[in-house]
Amino acid sequence: MTLRLTVESDAWRDHVRSVVTQLGATLPVVKGNGYGFGRSELLNHAKSITRDVAVGNVHELTNVPHDMRPFVLTPLGIGVTSVPRVDAVLTIGSTRDLAVLAALHVKNPVVIKVESSMHRYGVGAVDAARLRAQAESAGHDVIAWSVHLPLTGTDDTHADEAIAIARELAADLPIHLSHIGGAVQRVRSAVTHRVIVRTGTHLWLGDKSMLGLHADVIAVRPSTFATAGYRATALSHAGTSTQRIVMVGCGSANGVAALDDGRSPFHFAKHRLHMLEAPHMHTTMLSVTDEECPQEGDWVDVQQPLTRVYPDVVVWR
């Protein structure tokens, strides 16, 4: 029972190098599920780019090598009781974030998150200098400004927004930008800050042609029964020779789910395979009525965002 991610190693490494060449100064992001590769695996690749790396939250600091400097992207919040590394660069976007650090008695370096049109975390650009002064008065070394742009829109509209924000910020600190793409060069030509591109999905998954996600077929049985599955789902062709129940070795434990529109993510021989019921833990039950039925020992294609799934194995070819 296996969800397997296969990687064409040379092509993937060429892609990563080309992205870094295109973007220039880069801060690689290794967070969450490690974009399907696993965080430990990607940290080794990130180290070949720079000794700085961005992680999702303070709980992801534990497996960052000590010869790398981690940047924590999410403000700590009140649920955090300690910061395991004094060299971790933390994020603050409000005086409340600064108060959380004071309550923990930590003096870690920080970046100032500046509000973008996404309106998630961040201080308004006009108030950023005041928050910086408060952080420095509290004993924090302020490392950079940080702007997290939305996904919607074009690289050029993102560049316009980044330029407008940067012009409100002191240029003695670098500015970290997300979701800027090749338009970063236009930002660099328009501002005097050192611009660093923070990138994860584009860096690791920007070209999926060299990646494959598959699950193995564990068992196949004819539908000689009226219902099957956890929810006793009725079989539309019960007792016929055309319907088979196919068990594949991945499920909710791997982060595998129906597509956003409810369709099955499983394919075989260029046909979508219908799920009998939603994926559960380590198995998904499929209902196959056509002749292109996978057999035990086959692999079926799995259509899932790699930012969400947890493969059991990663095979580098």
Image (spheres, rainbow, N blue to C red):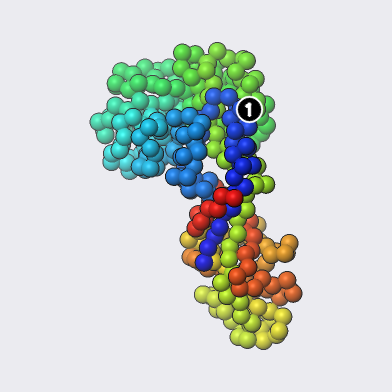
The reply to whether residue 234 is visible in this rendering is no
In this rendering, would 136 be left or right of 31? left
Residue 87 shows in this picture: yes
Image location of residue 62, percent across then percent down:
35, 42
Q: Is residue 183 above or below residue 83?
A: above
Residue drawn at (54%, 24%), measured in percent from left and top? 25
With respect to residue 119, does 232 lie above or below?
below
Residue in the image at 49% along x and 66% along y: 282
The quadrant holding residue 274 is bottom right
Q: Residue 145: give x, y in percent of width and height.
A: 47, 23
Question: Pointer 1: what residue?
Answer: 22
Q: Nearer the viewer, residue 69 or 195?
A: 69
At 55% from the left and 15% from the top, the residue drawn is: 167
Please name the amino acid that badge 1 sits on. Gln
Q: Residue 194: percent from the left, percent from the top?
A: 52, 18
Residue 141's spot in the image, x, y percent? Answer: 35, 21
Residue 16 higher or lower than 289, as above or below: above
- Position of 248 with respect to 144 (left or right) is right
Identify the image quadrant of residue 286: bottom right
